[in-house]
Every structure is written in C-alpha cells, then in structure tokens.
Image: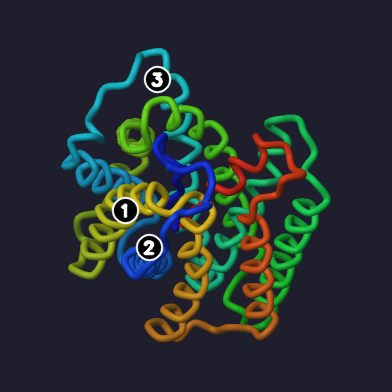
Amino acid sequence: MNSTATVPPNARDSDTGARFGPAEWSMSALMALIWGSSFLLIAIAIDDVDPGVVPLARVGFGAMALALIPAARRRLPRHTYPRLVFLGLVWMAIPFLLFPLAEQTTSSAVAGMINGALPVVTVAVTAVFVRAAPSRYRIAAVLVGFLGIALVSAGSLSEGGGADLRGIAMLIAAVLCYAVAVNIAAPLQRAHGSLPVILHVQLFAVLWTLPGGLSAFEPADITVEAVGALLVLGAIGTGMAFALYGLLLARTGPVRGMIGTYFTPVVAVVLGALVRSEPLHPLALVGMVVIIAGAAMTSRPDQSRPPAIDAVGSRSRQS
C-alpha cells in the first residue's frame, strides 16, 4: 500500500446495519491484492530504474487514472490549496520515495509487514493532533501494534532476515508520514469529497516529484518489466484503488471497510516469497500476526475513546 484513504462524506458513521455480502467481500479481497502487491511492484521497478523515478511515475499514472472519473475533477476552493500542497509532499512525495529507497536493502515482504502497522501508528499520531489521550483499550492496541513492529524489525534485521536498519527506519518514517497525512486529509475529504481531494493531492505531488524523477530518469534503464510495474502501481494501486476503497467504505462503514487492509501484509509476504524467493525469519512472521491483531483492535469502535481519535483511527490505511 503504499496508498492511504479516508472515509468519504457519504460513508456511514457506524457499521450497524451495513451490509457485508459477497460483493463487499470481493471488493475487500481486491483491495488486499492491489495494495498488498504494491511492495512487490516497487521491488520489480527498482531492479531497473532509479528509486527517484518511482514517486513521479506513481503519482503521474495515478492522477491520469483518477482524472478519468468525473467526480474527481471537481474544483476545490483556493483556501484548501496550502494544505493540498503540503499533503502532496507528506502523503505521497516523501513516502513514495522512502519505500523504494528502503526496498533497495529491505525485502518487499518486510515492507508490507511494517506498512501493516499504519492503523496503529495513526491512532498514536492522532492523539497528538487532537491533544487527547486514547483510552486504555486504544493504548493497549497501540502497544500490541508496536510490539509487532519490534518483532518484525528484530527478525528482519537478523542474518538472512531480508532487511537492514536503514531500510527499517525508512519504512517507519514512511508510515509516520501517512499517519500525519490522514489527520490533515480527513477534514478536507469530509468537506469536499474523497476523490477530488486525492486527485488534487496527486497533481501537487507531481510537482514535488518532478525534479527528482526527471533527474533520476535514464532511458537506457527502462525495461518492459519496469514500465509494467510502474504503470500498474500508479494507475491501479495509486489511482483507481482510491475510488474502489471509497466505494467500499460508503457501502460497509469505516470499521468493516478496513477488513481487506489487514490482509495486505499477508499478500506482500506471500508474493515476496513466491515471486522473488525473499527470506522470511520466523520472528518476523510472528510480528506480522501481532501487527494485524493490533490493527484489528484499532479498527473496533471504542465508546470510551474521544470521538475525534476513534473516527480518524478507524479510517486510516496505507500501502
């Protein structure tokens, strides 16, 4: 995932009575496959192109795909532009560069596992934004999630674990960027709609990533595999996936709408092992399970928790 989204204005505030049938399960499975495979696509792309090319390709292809949806092309008020410009940097330009840089020395499986902690990290960051401490239940969920990160990191940093300290640090920094961005993007999306905000953010991200992307681009490095990976990663994983996720949240509510996101680390691990024979340390696998448990705890409504924290915490996601 390297992508994140929040609930559109028409999403239900509660999952009470929300239908979750075969269509919703199919959409959730598709989201897990799309965002879970993004880490593999990044690894394939940087086999041939410089990591600096990846962010520009992602937001460029993503913006072109989203622009095909009429609702996404709606103009936004000018007073929102400063926040949109900043989101283009912290939501996309920076993390979209950190992931390929990290995956130079860290396996796509480990990247997917660390990224799975986004809901947990978002709860912690949101508590800082709203200046309200989470409930004991939420604190427990955060601690479980961070324990999972520690286990993944410890296992991955061991001999043959598929990561180094620099890569792990970059992955954690990218997840923190996503968590900060969610808190800034959420009110914008509630006020103006999910798709227009995302498209505008991607367009500003193009401006942020254009200098680095062009300077890192070498025509001789381009291969069919790299172009294919970047096209899918951008148009589908960074563009159209947001539209599908917004539709799923509108149909199911914010809690059950996140079901598919808990399986993205699993998809990343399986694809990394099958396609690239990436090493997996048993301790890292245990950590992945712990992260998923913490994320699941985070997604459950908590009546004792301040509404502002619970609302954002149950809407976060990134791949």
Whether 155 is drawn above or below 261: the answer is below
The answer to which of marks 3 and 2 sits earlier in the sequence is 2
Give the spatial CA distance, label 2 vs label 1.
8 Å
Quick check: marks 2 and 1 in contact, CB under 8 Å? Answer: yes
Which residue is at 53% across, 66% downward? Answer: 262
Nearer mark to the viewer, of 3 and 2: 2
The image shows residue 190 at horizontal and vertical percentages of 45, 31
Q: Which residue is mark 2?
A: 31
- Give the structural element (helix, strand or loop) at label 1: helix
The mark found on residue 255 in the picture is none
Residue at 50% of width from left, 34% of height from top? 186
- Pick whichever, 104 or 28, lies toward us: 28
Q: Quadrant of residue 161?
A: bottom right
Q: Is residue 257 above or below residue 86?
A: below
Cβ atoms at labels 3 and 1 below 8 Å apart: no
Residue with the mark numbered 3:
81
